[in-house]
């Protein structure tokens, strides 16, 4: 949909920690490489890389609640759901919450109060950020593609010998 010329609507800035919220299996593999872990969801440990700072951790909590949780209507909190007990146990320790696994069900719940930070249990952690796949590439040339129907310029990139690469955390596939 194209905005009318009289429209003054400006796009909003990305929400805090939005890069943590980007989900794909390719990026999940890179995150596992970054923070360690296992592809099997029941053996995955807590991704300690999200403890870099409060903004990153808050983005992680928001993203997790969007996928495997929900807000509580009656009070300022959210419920996170997982069958991975070690994961929820680690998370409960980080936010200073009590957690008891539900032995009667396959998944357990952890209530995360919006005031969890006031408990003072969050401790930032620094982790290695150089990915095995990371590296710099020399740009040989950049040229505008032929104009299309969209009101913006599209550029084509080719990174030889690799057909795919990351731009701002998103996989880009080389076009024809």
Image (tube, helix red, strand yellow):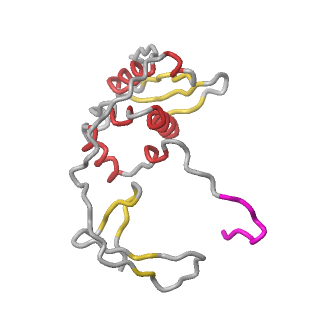
Residue 9 percent location from the top left of the image: 71, 59
Q: Report the side of 20 relative to 37 (left or right).
A: right
Residue at the extreme bottom: 146
In this view, the residue in front, 42 or 139, is: 139
In this view, the residue in front, 98 or 156, is: 156
In this view, the residue in front, 36 or 153, is: 153
Dominant secondary structure of the residues highlighted in magenta in the image: loop
Q: At x 38% / y 36%, what residue is drawn?
A: 50
- Picture quarter containing residue 121? top left
Magenta extent: 1-10
> Does the magenta-highlighted stretch encompass residue 77?
no
| Image quadrant occupied by the N terminus | bottom right
Q: At x 30% / y 31%, what residue is drawn?
A: 45
- Picture quarter containing residue 6? bottom right
> Does the magenta-highlighted stretch encompass residue 9?
yes
Q: Report the side of 31 relative to 116 (left or right).
A: left
Residue 98 percent location from the top left of the image: 45, 13
Q: Is residue 153 above or below residue 33?
A: below
Q: Report the side of 61 relative to 39 (left or right).
A: right
Q: At x 52% / y 77%, what residue is drawn?
A: 153
Q: At x 26% / y 61%, what residue is drawn?
A: 136
| Image quadrant occupied by the C terminus | bottom left
């Amino acid at each position: 949909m194209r905005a009318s010329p009289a429209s003054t609507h400006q796009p909003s800035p990305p929400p805090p920690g939005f890069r943590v919220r980007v989900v794909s299996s390719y990026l999940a593999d890179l995150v596992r490489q970054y923070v360690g872990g296992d592809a099997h969801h029941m053996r995955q440990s807590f991704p300690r890389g999200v403890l870099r700072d409060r903004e990153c951790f808050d983005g992680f909590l928001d993203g997790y609640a969007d996928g495997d949780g929900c807000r509580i209507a009656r009070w300022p909190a959210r419920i996170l759901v997982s069958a991975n007990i070690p994961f929820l146990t680690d998370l409960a320790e980080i936010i200073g919450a009590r957690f008891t696994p539900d032995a009667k069900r396959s998944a357990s719940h952890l209530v995360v109060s919006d005031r969890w930070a006031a408990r003072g249990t969050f401790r930032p952690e620094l982790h290695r950020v150089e990915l095995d796949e990371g590296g710099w590439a020399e740009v040989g040339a950049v040229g505008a593609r032929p104009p299309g129907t969209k009101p913006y310029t599209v550029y084509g990139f080719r990174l030889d010998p690799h057909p795919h690469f990351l731009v701002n955390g998103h996989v880009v596939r080389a076009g024809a």
